[in-house]
Amino acid sequence: MRFIRRTHYIQDIALFKHEGQIFWYCALMIALLASPFLLSNFYLGELSMVFIYAIAGVGLMLLTGYTGLVSLGHAAFLAIGAYTHAYLLARGWPFLVSIPAATFFTAAIGGIVGIPALRMTGIYLAVATLAFAIIVEQILSHWVSVTGGFRGMAVQPPAIGNLSLDSSVAFYFVCLATLLICLLLALNLLRSPTGRAMTAIRDSEISAQSMGIHLAYTKTLAFTISAGFTGLAGCLLAHKIGYLAPDSFTLLTSIQLLLMVVIGGLGSLHGVIYGAMFIGLLPQGIALLRDTLPPAVAQIPGLEPGVFGLILVLVLIYEPLGIYGRWLKIRNYFEEFPLYRKATHKRQRRYLRTERLR
């Protein structure tokens, strides 16, 4: 059993809690750096998609898991980032300039969307963001001169000068480096006063306001940062799929992102990684499931969204802390063995936003 004693505030906000974390993170990095030399292009492509989902999940986790604002419209931010990046590349913008420009533009749109959503919480906010996603989908479908409409829009391959990044290995390293930068930015944000303010709003808006936290500013900033991360993921997703169409960013995409953070574990960046791995592997599992089901059942329209919804309900009922919460229980079992007691870690409900004073 490891005892961590903190005697200073700096220890509480340290990036790593103990030396063991540094060792395991270094081992994970070595494994990820060695993966291109051990895996085929197919698995590298799947890992790249997991990294892209994880980047988008970091943005949604900051909004939903740490600020307590539910969003069903993050597919719209994903689409805005992807289409903006593809449009700028088609106009001759360099790759290293187009990605930051598309990211900041998506963040600005997120800030604008966050302003009217300040007075809404819970299901009302979810419906409002869903309406925003539907509006964006209609704009992408009918603004033919910019997006190509239903015909779609081709995306130029990524390149830095004369160096092409279109190969599976190069794009894998681009996605990995981007994910690491996003995780470091998110960790430093959460350790800052702004991150503490976001967490306070999630726990209780009334208590946060009584402590002097500006609710409107913090919520708008959370929307802005979340949209920026998601727009960055959209830029990489545009290169991954190679061709953009409005039906690539539907309600199912928003449900997948929300499912990712809930199943991974709300309020944890580790949960984002677990959830991204789950979402990345789930389509393959559903494809295998279709082969084993009777044809009458396998050809039912909407089978994939139904499976997503069923998994989400089961996780909320039986494991509300997600995959990362289950891992913590397993880890605590071995750390406290043989003193572990089953009643030590009781199953508890995790709400997106607690309202203790209402």
Image: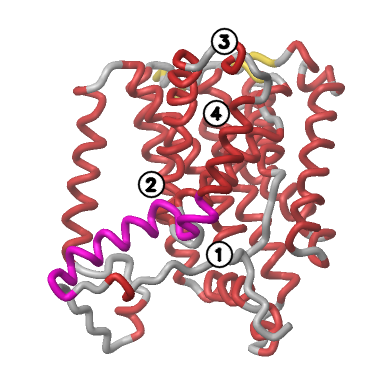
Residue position marked by numbered label 2 in the rendering = 180
**Magenta span has 81?**
no
- Of mark 4 and mark 2, the one earlier in the sequence is 2
Which element type, helix, strand or loop, lies under badge 1?
loop
Q: Report the predominant secondary structure element of the magenta stretch.
A: helix
- Of mark 3 and mark 4, the one earlier in the sequence is 4
Q: Amino acid at mark 3?
A: Pro
Is residue 246 placed above or below 347 in the rendered structure? above
Residue 15 rendering spot, x and y as whole percentages: 32, 66
Q: Which residues are magenta?
A: 315-339
Which element type, helix, strand or loop, lies under badge 2?
helix
Q: Is residue 160 left or right of residue 227?
A: left
Residue position marked by numbered label 3 in the rendering = 295
Q: Is residue 89 left or right of residue 9?
A: right
Residue position marked by numbered label 4 in the rendering = 237
- Of mark 1 and mark 3, the one earlier in the sequence is 1
Q: Residue at x 15, y 69 (%)?
A: 337
**Magenta span has 336?**
yes
> Which of 279/159 is in front?
279
